[in-house]
Amino acid sequence: MTSMTRREFGALTLGAITLPRLVAAQSVSGVRLGVQTYSFRELPRTPGGDQTAGIISAMQTCGLTECELWSPQIEPAAAGGRGRTPEQVREAREELRTWRVSTPLDHFRGIKDAFGKIGASIYAYNYSFGNDFSDEEIDRGFDHARALGAEIITASTNLTVARRVVPFAEKHKMPVAVHNHSNTKDPNEFATPESFAAAMALSKYFKVNLDIGHFTAANYDPVAYLREHHADITNLHLKDRKKAQGDNTPWGTGDTKIREVLALLKREKWPIRAYIEYEYRGATGPIEEVKKCLDFATQALA
């Protein structure tokens, strides 16, 4: 994987959105709005590189300056893929493990600097510890996050793996915010208020990255959870889903209380980031759909 060239970065800085507008868009009525960069997963990689340039350009176009960076977008391409044999998948997984533990930290500092040059920052590094992670991979993820300038790690993981992460979070003194999905049938998964409580009981460094869409699909009320547990929540993923394991939908057409959640953040002035996560199937591509979501949030906060 190669770093962004000076020419590529120069092209990024010529975007139509000016820096003052970017900075102004970071906070609306006191609520910190940003984006989970998974929203831009469909954007192409730089040939021989990663999605850093595309993410930065997309954030410029949308007028956003803060993000939660999804780790696969800056790592080598995924090990899966149609037509690969199991042996090829295993080899690719080992190559990713090697990349994670051996890539110089200056590589990640370069990504941080590329964001910084347009006035943008990486608040959270979404590094989802899996069952197949080695201890060295877990440990190195905290180094990556620190080099990227992230304040926290967010993770789609499970309770079994979270127990393994505890000593590393305490060693690095960095919060790990567990991310929920909607699978309430597996007690090892993070989906319920009880599963969040089990994570936070493991360490003072464990917090909650509340996905209000998945929480709604699991038939829980994100507004009620926010009121009771706001001190333990680092950031939100904003999306709209139907209740009872319903689909992702364009914002305002599902059951998720996006407006009410944003109004609560505005009223209470809690320091909880609210990050757009574009996950429904839109008609106009990720950049235009993220713009629509940002407009929805901005109007809700007006």
Image (spheres, rainbow, N blue to C red):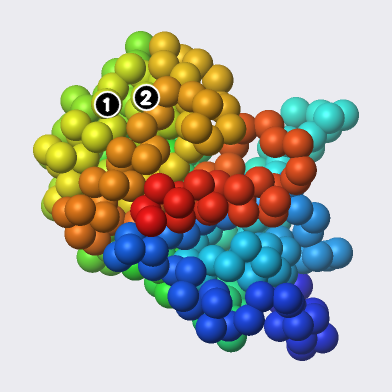
Q: Quadrant of residue 54?
A: bottom right
Q: Is residue 239 above or below residue 232?
A: above
| Residue named by callout 1 | 221
Residue at 37% in and 24% down: 216
Q: Position of residue 166 (x, y in %)?
A: 25, 49
What kind of residue is marked 1? Asp
Query: Is residue 127 in view from this perspective?
Result: no
Query: Is residue 197 in view from this perspective?
Result: yes
Residue at 80% in and 65% down: 46
Q: Is residue 187 above or below residue 257?
A: above
Q: Position of residue 58 (x, y in %)?
A: 68, 63
Residue at 76% in and 43% down: 284
Name the element at disc 1. loop
What kind of residue is marked 2? Thr
| Residue named by callout 2 | 216
Q: Earlier in the sequence, mark 2 or mark 1?
A: 2
Residue contact between numbered discs 2 and 1, judged by CB atoms under 8 Å: yes
Q: Quadrant of the N terminus?
A: bottom right
The residues bearing labels 2 and 1 have C-alpha atoms spaced at a distance of 6 Å
Q: Residues within 10 Å of mark 2 (few under 14, many from 20)?
A: many
